[in-house]
Structures are given as structure tokens and as C-alpha cells.
Amino acid sequence: MSDPASLRGAVEDLDTLVDRLAAEQDAPGAPGAEPVGTDATADGRPEPPLLAGEQETLEGFLDFLRATVLRKAAPLSDEQAARHLVGSDTTVTGMLRHLADTERYWFREVLGGVPLEDVGYRWSDGHDTESEWVLAAGASLEEALGDYRGATEQSRSQLSGREPAEELHGGNEVRTVRWVLTHMVEETARHAGQLDILVELLDGRTGE
């Protein structure tokens, strides 16, 4: 774990980093400022479709964000991905574990109606999520990456044949497929933004 002085410096720099990252995304020639393609970005991430129906568009943005998370995290070492840079238990490996079990909750338990004991949560019980962030010594980044990939594949299979307006009765409230997809775009985008900052602090990489 980082020493207290380094930790304070990292925390103090977060606001500056957020402002600079936002400026880079908006600047001419920045990846986010270029026209969106139709099939894939130059780095292989799937582009959301430009002319498509509601559900295909939402799934396209979610798949782009999932691929962004994987692309950001994959080059790190186990030690880097387990390093604490802020005052909470947040780490890159912990974030991947959290995202994987979040996929399982929304797409298997809520959307798929799978009983809790059959959902297959890997890092938590699906509801008390604190354990997702607690890493044992030597925690494997590759294991977390592989588990996240597997969870997203299960999510895609649960979406097959669904319609945006379909009502879902899993969980504590009735909601639609549209709501779940929109929420997961928001959830994954939020953590992808956090990864932007963590990765720059860890190895200097910036951009999408």
C-alpha cells in the first residue's frame, strides 16, 4: 500500500486530473472528438451503431464501455491493479470484481429471474458487496479480467429475445429491460471514468 504522503498527494491531484482528462476528450483530435465509425474503433472496441433500434443502441454503448474497462485494466501488473490510491478500498482489481457481480445481479437475478442461489456470484452474495473490494495478498488481475468477460457473456445471453418495454419482476421493484440497460450504461461509464484516473496515476496512460 502507498505511504501516507503519497496517498495524500494522489488524492489532492484527483480534481486536477479530472479537469485535464475532460479537456483532452474535448480537444480537437482527441479520440472522443472524432466522428464515430460503424463497426469498431482503431483499437478494436465495438462501436455503438449509428442507425439502430433502441435496444441495439443501448447494448452497443454498453459493449463499448465494457471493452473500454478491459482495455484500461489489462496492461497493469497484479501489484498495480491491487494498489490503493485513494482513502477507500477502491482498486482496479476490486472494481473489475464489483462490475462482474453487478452484471450478474442485473442481468441474471433481476432480468433473468434466476434464483439467488443459482446466480453464480463470484465475489459477494450479490447484495452485501463490500467483499468485492477486499483483496487478499497476491490477488490476480487476470483472474478478475477473465471473470468479468465471462459475466458479460452471460449478460448478453440473458438479453437475447428481450424487448425494451418488457417488464421485469426480479428484485424488489418492477422495472423494464430498458431501465436495466440504461442503468448498466451509467454504472459501467462511471467506473470507466474512475479507471481513467487510477490508470493515469499508476502508469501514466491517458485517453479513452
Image (spheres, helix red, strand yellow):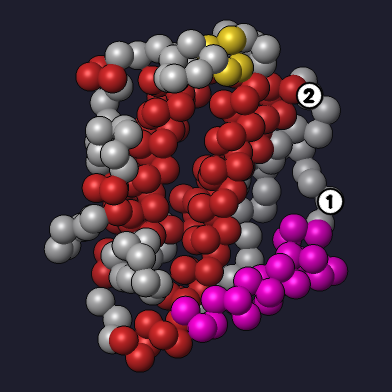
Residue positioned 79% across, 66% down in the render:
26
Percent position of residue 80, x then y: 33, 70
Percent position of residue 23, x then y: 75, 72
Instruction: Give the dominant element type of the magenta stretch: helix, strand or loop.
Output: helix
Instruction: Say if 34 sits above or below 184 in the image.
Output: below
Instruction: Say if 155 sits above or below 68 in the image.
Output: above
Question: Regarding mark 2 in the picture, which secondary structure is present there?
Answer: loop
Drawn side of residue 93 relative to residue 14, left or right: left
Residue positioned 67% across, 30% down in the render:
58
Instruction: Say if 110 sits above or below 183 in the image.
Output: above
Magenta-colored stretch includes residue 25: yes
**Span highlighted in magenta in the image:** 11-33
Number of other residues with Cα within 10 Å of mark 1, as a class: few under 14, some 14 to 19, many 20 or more: few
Percent position of residue 59, x then y: 62, 29
Circle 1: residue type: Pro
Q: Which residue is mark 1?
A: 35
Number of other residues with Cα within 10 Å of mark 2, as a class: few under 14, some 14 to 19, many 20 or more: few
- Residue at the outermost left position: 137
Q: Is residue 14 visible?
A: yes
Circle 2: residue type: Ala
Q: Earlier in the sequence, mark 1 or mark 2?
A: 1
Q: Which mark is residue 52?
A: 2
The quarter of the picture where residue 6 lies is bottom left
Residue positioned 55% across, 64% down in the render:
196
Q: Is residue 160 visible?
A: no
Q: Nearer the viewer, residue 107 or 202?
A: 107
Question: Regarding mark 1 in the picture, which secondary structure is present there?
Answer: loop
Magenta-colored stretch includes residue 57: no
